[in-house]
Amino acid sequence: MGKMKILIILVLVLASAGAGAFFFLGKDAEGSSDKEKQPTAEELAAMSIDTDIITTNLASPNFGIVQFNILLDSEKAKEEAEKRTPEVRAAIISTVAGFTKEELVGADGIAMLEEQLKGKLVEIMQTGKVERVLVTEFKVQ
């Protein structure tokens, strides 16, 4: 019975040591949590571009005035996007022109516009990746 108690104690000690090691080694090399990995405002600004305000006709007899903020995954990707301004602008115009006024109304319409534009921009970019597209100005008349 004495050996059985020692064996049980040994198993418990090893299990708790393993759990402790898992907890501490589960963090990244700097020991930071997920919340600390969020980019700062300066980092976001260094990796994003704002488009010009663009006015274009819609699929319905209306027109839209839009502006976007495009967040890229690196400064190299930002440089490429800036060099591809005519292609980015054409993608915006063709995407917005494919919608009717009714389709763009509300949060769902804006989200759909952002998602479709992101898809077109992903096809254009060769270096880096488009992280997100945000509508920063939006008017339909």
Image: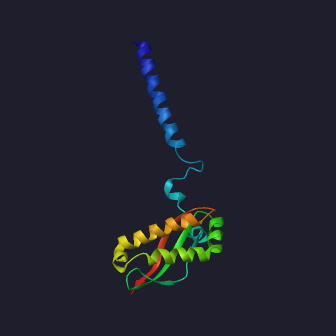
Asked if one can make out residue 50 in the rendered structure from this viewpoint, the answer is no
Q: Residue at x 47, y 78 (%)?
A: 136
The image position of residue 61, as x and y in percent, is: 38, 85
Q: Residue at x 45, y 70 (%)?
A: 114
Near-viewer residue (46 or 50)? 50
Q: Tell me if residue 87 comes above or below residue 1 in the rendering.
A: below
Location of the C terminus (image quadrant): bottom left
The image position of residue 13, as x and y in percent, is: 47, 28
Q: Tell me if residue 30 comes above or below residue 1 in the rendering.
A: below
Q: Residue at x 58, y 67 (%)?
A: 124
Count every numbered label the image shows and give the total: 0
Near-viewer residue (73 or 140)? 140
The image position of residue 132, as x and y in percent, is: 50, 66
Q: Residue furthest bottom?
A: 141
Q: Residue at x 40, y 79 (%)?
A: 59
Location of the N terminus (image quadrant): top left
